[in-house]
Amino acid sequence: MRTNYPSSGWAGLTKMRCQNTGSAGRARLARAASHPTWKPPLVSRVIPFGPGAKRTTKLTISLLYYLARESSRFVLRLAGRSPNPRLVVLYYHGIPDAHRSDFVRQLDSIGCKAQVVPASHRGLLPSNKTNVAITFDDAYASVAKNALPALIARGFHSTIFVPTGTLGGPPPWSIEDGSPDSLETVMSAEQIAMLPSALVTVGAHSRSHPRLSRLTPDDARQEIEGSRRELQDLTGQDVRLFALPYGDHDSSTIKLCRTAGYEAVFTTVPVPVDTTNSDLVRGRIKVDPFDGRLEFFLKYNGAYAWTPYIAALKKRLMNRRSPFLSGQRLSPGRS
């Protein structure tokens, strides 16, 4: 198994004895050491808790979650009951040239162990296999170059969410330092118009990729309604799907999406979808072509569904602490 994790260390504050390697430093240490009460000074080195450690922790918990869930499903089957199947919606961004073969490997893994259905699917799902939908945010040109040929060759359906105000240029929105997205270009209008509609659905992704909850209601409406209108004019398709930039939204954002005529709105919360209900909002799990084999397997099997509950618990605990912290007052001069 090959997993490319960002370089980082475990958290901790370690105490280290100060050492001086120069001749003058050694002489000072020798003189000081002759004093019976002398002790080397302590210096602190902070080892940051980086994304690699967090990723490994989430991977471990997800594996345990998957094993526990499969055990419970096995018990249900023994009792003559079938677990209600869910749809796991994956979302990628770009597929760089260097990771084209990794993406193909992921598709082959899905092809052996799962069934690919459109992200818009509603109704019953087969229970004998994992059900997966494949989506791409930001409509990067690398998706057209490296992903679509492999998807079409396998007959896999996909959905591409398009930011209509940035076609043909580099992404102008905020991107994490070191992300391969910084080297990407958004597809041109011609590329979007030529996407094969039989296996590729286009969805809106706003016009300028803002955080919609931070906009005024009028500006948010223009982003949500305008991107749908522009995309329909460009492709001739009836655009019914919307992906929230950054996953950011509030209740008014969802109301605007409903009013604009969307039938499904996709977040970045990794919760599998119950396709038998009429819910507007659907969860998705972020995947990358360089995810390790085990990590990717757990992701497309919905094993990261526990993470929103932990996030909600942390938020609740922080809210409980806030009144206490805000009520604290420091008294100068008192110990």
Image (cartoon, grey):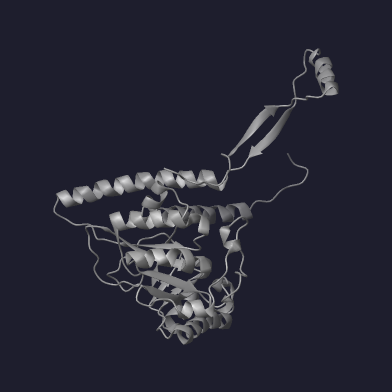
* Residue 310 shows up from this direction: yes
- Front residue of 130/15: it is 130
Q: Is residue 184 above or below residue 198?
A: above
Q: Residue at x 35, y 47 (%)?
A: 65
- Front residue of 329/44: it is 44
Q: Residue at x 47, y 44 (%)?
A: 56
Q: Quadrant of the C terminus?
A: top right
Measuring from the top left, give residue 38's x and y in whole percent: 78, 18
Q: Quadrant of the N terminus?
A: top left
Within the image, what quadrant is residue 276 found in? bottom left
Measuring from the top left, give residue 187's x and y in whole percent: 53, 73
Q: Name, please, the residue furthest toward the right.
A: 24
Q: Is residue 114 above or below residue 62?
A: below
Q: Residue at x 24, y 60 (%)?
A: 84
Task: State left or right for residue 129 relative to residue 302.
Answer: left
Task: State left or right for residue 247 relative to residue 331.
Answer: left
Task: State left or right for residue 43 relative to residue 90.
Answer: right
Q: Residue at x 34, y 70 (%)?
A: 118
Q: Is residue 19 above or below residue 202?
A: above
Number of marks in the image? 0
* Residue 135 shows up from this direction: no
Measuring from the top left, give residue 156's x and y in whole percent: 34, 66
Measuring from the top left, give residue 70's x and y in whole percent: 27, 48
